[in-house]
Image: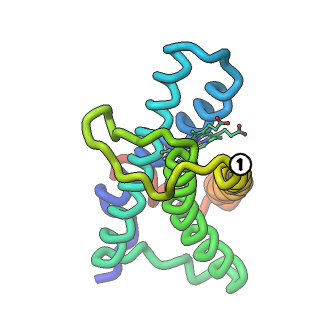
Amino acid sequence: MTQLRYTGTAKTLHWTAAVLIVCGFSLGLFMTGLEISPDKLRLYAWHKWIGITVFLIAIARVAWRATHPAPPPLPSKPDWQKRASRAAHWFLLALMVIIPISGWIYSSATGVSVVYLGIIPLPDLVPKDRESAKALLILHKTLNYTLAAVVTVHVAAALKHHFVDHDGVMARMLPGR
Ligand code: HEM
């Protein structure tokens, strides 16, 4: 039978990732402006844990998606819209994988190893190197501003479905039945 709504697991992964991305993004902007202090270092650690959690959710999402396909697009929608929404969803998922890895590599290049949740030491992905760190920071920032742009379009499209088209597309991802 064709699934008409997202499963409870897909919704949980989606909304947990959404909250974590907003928190991780805002924290990233906030923490970089602080004077060096123990609080700043603590916020950097939280930022990294949030980012690694987003990465793990993205992996879980891909695995879940492999066995539980997303509900099909509404047949009434034009082809370009179906293609655009599919492309945007895969692009968002790709950014959820690539952005945390870019942050992790950047952290390694600055010589700071990542200890996930303060418990699990993650391997350094590259040796410490000041020049590559500079380039990786630019990459991490650029990917994040790309993410912000795609998320803005994604949210705007969802709200249009809900409040203008009244077509139930956003309701398929909302909590509840
Ligand atoms: C979805 C996940 C992530 C998001 C949305 C995110 C977002 C951001 C943002 C918005 C900034 C500020 C950029 C700016 O100054 O313009 C930032 C900085 C930073 N991020 Fe991430 N990040 C993520 C994952 C990670 C991960 C996994 C790590 C490391 C393991 C990491 C390490 C860093 C570091 C060290 C900085 C500070 C750079 C500096 O000191 O200027 N990020 N991040």
Residue in front for this viewpoint, 175 or 168: 175
Quarter occupied by the N terminus: bottom left
Quadrant assignment, res 84: bottom right
What residue sits 34% from the left and 49% below the top?
Answer: 122
Side of 43 relative to 53 (left or right): right
Q: Position of residue 37 (x, y in %)?
A: 56, 13
Q: Position of residue 88 (x, y in %)?
A: 63, 69
What residue sits 50% from the left and 48% below the top?
Answer: 108
Q: Is residue 35 visible?
A: yes
For the residue labelled by badge 1, is the local secondary structure a helix, a strand or a loop? helix
> Label 1 sits on what residue type?
Lys
Q: Is residue 19 visible?
A: no
Question: In the picture shown, does residue 61 fall above or below 19?
Answer: below
Color scheme of the displayed model: rainbow
Distance from mark 1 CB to nearest ligand 1 atom below 8 Å: no
Residue in front for this viewpoint, 126 or 36: 126
- Bin the neighbour count of mark 1 within 10 Å (Cα to Cα): few under 14, some 14-19, many 20 and up: few
Q: Quadrant of ligand 1?
A: top right
What residue sits 71% from the left and 23% below the top?
Answer: 33
The image shows a total of numbered marks equal to 1
Q: Position of residue 168 (x, y in %)?
A: 53, 61
Question: In the picture shown, does residue 83 fall above or below 18?
Answer: below
Disc 1 target residue: 134
Q: Position of residue 27 (x, y in %)?
A: 58, 30
Residue in front for this viewpoint, 77 or 44: 44
